[in-house]
Amino acid sequence: MEDRTRTRRDRTHWLYLAVIVAVLAGILVGWLAPGTGRALAPLGTMFVDLIKMMIAPVIFCTIVLGIGSVRAAATVGKVGGLAIGYFLLMSTVALGIGLLVGNLLDPGTGLNIAGTAGQGAQYAEEAHGAGGTVEFLQSIVPTTLVSALTAGSVLQALFVALLVGFAVQAMGSAGEPILRGVALIQKLVFRILAMILWLAPIGAFGAMANVVGRTGLDAVVQLATLMIAFYLTCLLFVFGVLGVLVRLVARVSIFKLCRYLAREYLLIVATSSSESALPRLIAKMEHMGVERTTVGVVVPTGYSFNLDGTAIYLTMASIFIADAMGQPLNLGEQFGLLVFMIVASKGAAGVTGAGLATLAGGLQSHRPELLDGVGLIVGIDRFMSEARALTNFSGNAAATLLIGTWTKSVDTERVREVLDRKRPFDEQTMVDDHESHPIADSGGAKDLIPA
């Protein structure tokens, strides 16, 4: 059986090689024929939309299967509470790192940005349209039970899945047929997802051609200092902060974890969207040995609350703009503005270009005279969004492993075997049909569902 799994994985290897070729081709087309590159934008957008179409069903099946199989409801509450606390702490750490690097480098000092005035207002309007904390909380409750699976909202799907999962759990043995049905639906959902992923080269080609066609390579060269500083800061956070935590708590190498998630990183770079890798992250963390309940709660919640890359971006971009406009922020203003933005980013999580919109909204609220400076980084924001997405994705992967370790809901032996490539991930089905890993506090229910 292991040989057959290896063969399946080898076939998909060509898919990701094609993605690399498509990215390079997209860069060339966008550079040499900008008009054609911009016209190819729908290819990238349609691929990301196809992936987003699968996110709600994946979350729903994962959480219902996880919670429905756990006898003790307190287990879910413990995981959720620990996850929120961890997310708030890590966002603060990320903010602090961005603040430190931004003040040390001062990459915006001496720049002339007179020609960019007036380009930030539209992004501030987007952030305002996203609403505040109250609107954000209200948006979690869907119009109907079914609309949560069709509206495309991660938190609505999470909310409904929790309700259904607890309801099935309360039904006891009467809910076993429902769990078996959801398990079959999960296999179907992942099979559809595997089919969609074969379109990744087309989506990557269109996305990269559009980005380069719109921004040109000159924008990248002009603001290379900020981009390099931001990328290095994200690397410092992932391999420094997260790497140390994962090593100390879970006894796992961050380099092995990143190698295990290499294809997801490539998918994010190709599409500039971390959502394109969300379903695969859920499947891979389950395969690695983290229980469904933990994965189902931590990953979807993290996509709205654990925005480490966005926190670093908001910090460094604010300092950059203020310095470039000759109106640097003092330390008190930096903390006040950036804490506001971290909170605001939760409400703007569903907005396209949320990082840029939240940045503009925060500047408008605290230092409106700096709003015009947003136009300076519009040209490279798409390139920086890839680093944001990669960092957010890494943070959520590490959080799932850490919280699984703290709640004793992870099979440590299986984690080592998977990261050492002794248990390859089935790229075709994304579901482990022939193995079952334990589910905490589930009693006899743990054998109901194939892992």
Image (tube, helix red, strand yellow):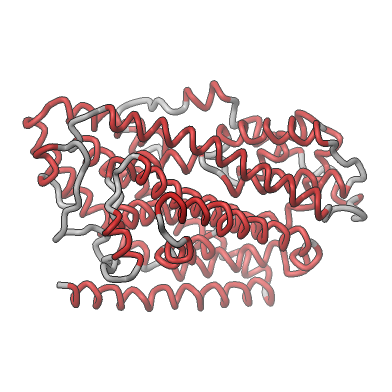
- The front one of 122 and 317 is 317
Residue 176 image point, x, y percent: 9, 37
> Eyeballing the image, is 20 above or below 448?
below
Q: Write down the quadrant of residue 144 in the picture.
A: top left
> Eyeballing the image, is 423 above or below 226?
below
- The front one of 241 and 303 is 241
> Eyeballing the image, is 356 above or below 160?
below
Residue 70 seen in the figure: yes
Q: Is residue 311 left or right of residue 403?
A: right
Which residue: 14% across, 72% down?
1
Residue 90 image point, x, y percent: 56, 41
Residue 180 image point, x, y percent: 12, 44
Residue 324 image point, x, y percent: 87, 49
- The front one of 123 and 9 is 9
Residue 192 seen in the figure: no
Q: Is residue 395 left or right of residue 38?
A: left
Which residue: 54% across, 72% down?
23
Q: How many marks?
A: 0
> Eyeballing the image, is 259 above or below 439?
below
Q: Is residue 322 left or right of residue 134?
A: right
Which residue: 34% across, 29% down?
77
Q: Write down the quadrant of residue 386 in the picture.
A: bottom right
Q: Write down the quadrant of residue 38 in the picture.
A: bottom right
